[in-house]
Image (cartoon, grey):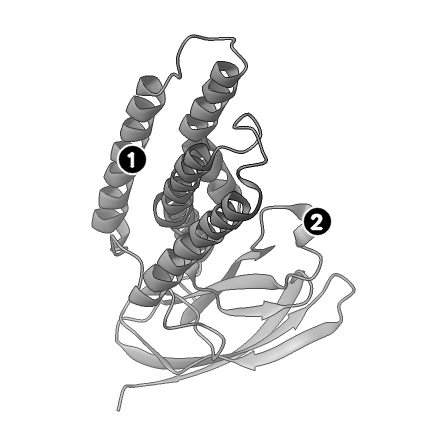
Amino acid sequence: MLFVMVSILIFSIPGLWFLWTSIDFKLGKREKISWKTPVILLIILVFSSILIHIYLFKTYGFPIFQTNIETVIGMAIVGLVAGIILIINVFVTITMGKQLPKSIHDPKTVNILALCFAIHLFIILFIAAPTGKKVAFAASINQAMAATQNADTEEFSIALVSSERECLRSTSCRSTPYSNQYFIQNNLSKTQEVQVKIRALNSSNEEMKVIDSKIMTLKPNELRLLETEETSEDSSVWNQYSFQTDYRIATYQHLLRFRDPE
């Protein structure tokens, strides 16, 4: 999640800059709100993100956009959060608006803040987070390639690239399972159908899970994420994992079988 955290922090700079100058303006520490510089910085970041997406598309074949389901969920989150803020603002304005001075409750200011927050959340969900996740998945592919490049004597190479929790704060990670990414490469000179059984072990060498992969068709030298019944086909490739466990995988055992495609 390091790449995602860094990406979100970078894209949050313009919003935090604008918020900081707004507070200073409210307190009388500056004559006007500084919005031009944060907007220019945001445009530069968005343009840079587009270039990264294009590079990853050409290099790794990653789709430019998320799946339709992820887009709908993201838009629903943005609309829900903004809607809740606006509803609360309307409720407070109707019930107590006339009794509260504008220094405490200004409906117009709240509406502007709700709009700014919705825009910020949209940028995080549709630009910052996908950029970070794409970069992280590209790094996983590179690690898998490095781990399998010296395994030419084996018919298939399998590598566990990551076993981590998908959360940003340590306090929210306690009940979050570990998402595990295995990659498999076909080292043969012909297309094969392959299925793998994984036995995942924790740091105490205790069995956590035994799971079969899907029957995957791999071309010669093709490297792909190992897919199981837990791999979501509705998620973008950079959001996918092989399977989840309650604890980090320390080591694993595997069996595989393969055949010529029918």
Q: Residue 124, image x and y in percent? A: 41, 44
On-image quarter of the C terminus = bottom left
Front-most of residues 87 and 244: 87
Give the total number of marks visible in the rendering: 2
Front-most of residues 26 and 55: 26
Front-most of residues 93 and 220: 93
Q: Which amino acid type is marked by label 1?
A: Val
Q: Residue 187, image x and y in percent? A: 35, 67
Numbered disc 1: secondary structure: helix
Q: Which amino acid type is marked by label 2?
A: Thr
Say which residue appears at 29% left-offset and 65% top-offset.
Answer: 68
Residue 157 at least partly seen: yes
Task: Look at the picture and state if 4 lies above or below 137.
Answer: above
Which residue is denoted by mark 1 in the rendering?
Answer: 46
Q: Residue 40, image x and y in percent? A: 29, 23
**Which class describes the residues within 10 Å of circle 1: few (<14), some (14-19), or many (20+)?**
some
Query: Where on the picture, by quarter, is residue 226?
Result: bottom left
Query: Where on the picture, by quarter, is residue 164?
Result: bottom right
Which residue is denoted by mark 2 in the rendering?
Answer: 171
Residue 154 at least partly seen: no
Q: Residue 35, image x and y in percent? A: 35, 21
